[in-house]
Amino acid sequence: MKLIDPFRDPEPIKSAIRHLQPKAISCADQLGRPVQIMEVCGGHTHTLFKFGLPELLPKQIEFVHGPGCPVCVLPRAVIDQAIALATRADVIFTTFGDALRVPGSEHSLQAVRAQGADVRVLYSPADALVLAQQNPSKQVVFFAIGFETTMPSTALVIQQAAKQGFENFSVLSHHITIMPTLRALLDRDDVLIDGFIGPGHVSAIIGEQAYRDIADHYQKPLVISGFEPLDIVQSIDMLLTQLVEQRCDIENQYTRVVKSKGNQAALNAMYDVFAIDSEDALWRGLGQIKDSGAPISNAYAHFDAAKRFALPVQNQEIDCSGYCDQVMIGKLKPSQCPHFGKSCSPQQPMGALMVSTEGACSAYYRYRPLMENSEVV
Amino acid sequence: MCLGIPTQIIEITNADSALAVVELGGVRREVNVALLVEELPLDQLIGQWAIVHAGFAIGLVDEDEAQQTLATISDWEREEPAS
């Protein structure tokens, strides 16, 4: 397919890997250890494993799988809130499919659906408004999760609901933003990262300059990357070039989609509907992250399901297995977790990293046989 | 979760609500293109490629930039010593 296939062609990918090899060796020599690159976005984690890139790339490059999978960082407490709404007789609860199997403290949305709760999977938040129109006697709640990529869509739907005066539509919002998260990671002293592969579609909304702090304050290079294997390999080349030249800049490999200033129409909608970076948010595995939450603003409070249904505030994460957080900050490889592939699998996930196909554990589980084969060869 | 797919805009189906039909690999569906109209007016969107995420087009794809990215890698291939 146009705009996809040329970026998956094996020959240019191999050539680009040969091109970056001397830089990887030189960087690792300078550092006295392998180069640690964090791919922030779960979509990049998925591409890495799907195309077997860690095995094709020089062994001097190691990946730290970042926290950028909104499903993987959904706290149990928020799933419990979702379940409290979904099990009300007067509610049609709507969600993206990704969130269905994430375990709460006792159940998942999928489990309560099996017991009769009206939980529906939507492709787009706009479909929730259609449902609200078709079911005037029900309250339709949309479970809004995701980073800046998804926030403008939720914002447009809430604006439309306000304009048309919907009384039976509201949003349970757990949107989170990327920059406070990266800051929180870089402020920890137990995370070793030499450079970042930046999230392509978040950046299509927020632009390049939003990341300035990473280079200016934290002195780390970041390259915004597309999602095809050739994009990722070229982004790694650009990161290594910066490291060899001892530079820290924000660079953009994904120029075909990401504009320097982002998408202004999307930013306007987001800032109208959400109070961006205005409160601490709870992340599974990482705890409270300062300013990473984006609650629905006062002007649109009427559409905030947490207020409409007077849900108790959730600011305490319920402890899970204790290993997910170590995988999330790159201290443990997924396969080093004692639950991996035993008590925790994609069929029966204990932790959210095993739920989403973008989660590091799920990607390891799915593609591990391939990796083990390539190690033998 | 932030998955976005490059699709081609085929026709505008509802100008008031900024709805358009997009196509990828023979599959068509209606999406919201309101987030693109600051870049291009609705009637000029037809034929353009856009990244679609959760039923909303979130950005246009610049085909010239795509070609330039591929050309950079081709240059690397040409520079390689013949084996």
Image (cartoon, helix red, strand yellow):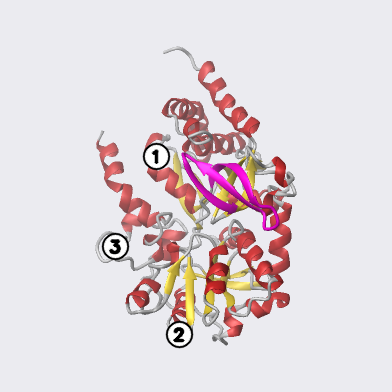
Q: Chain of mark 1?
A: A
A350 up-or-down from A232: above or below: below
Identify the residue at image location x=57%, y=48%: B21
Q: Chain of mark 3?
A: A
Question: As drawn, is A293 to the left or to the right of A93?
Answer: right
The residue tagged 1 is A51
State which mark lies toward you, 2 or 3. 2
Task: Give, as a single range, the part of the protein colored magenta.
Answer: B5-31
Question: Mark 1: which amino acid?
Answer: Phe
Q: Earlier in the sequence, mark 2 or mark 1?
A: 1
Q: Earlier in the sequence, mark 1 or mark 3?
A: 1
A21 up-or-down from A313: above or below: above
Q: Quadrant of residue A172?
A: bottom right
State which mark lies toward you, 2 or 1. 2
Q: Residues within 10 Å of mark 3 (few under 14, many from 20)?
A: few
The residue tagged 2 is A88
Camera sees residue A223: no
State the image coordinates of residue A201 (x, y, percent, origin top left): 58, 50
Camera sees residue B39: yes
Q: Distance of mark 1 from mark 3, alpha carbons?
A: 23 Å
Quarter the C terminus of chain A occupies = top left
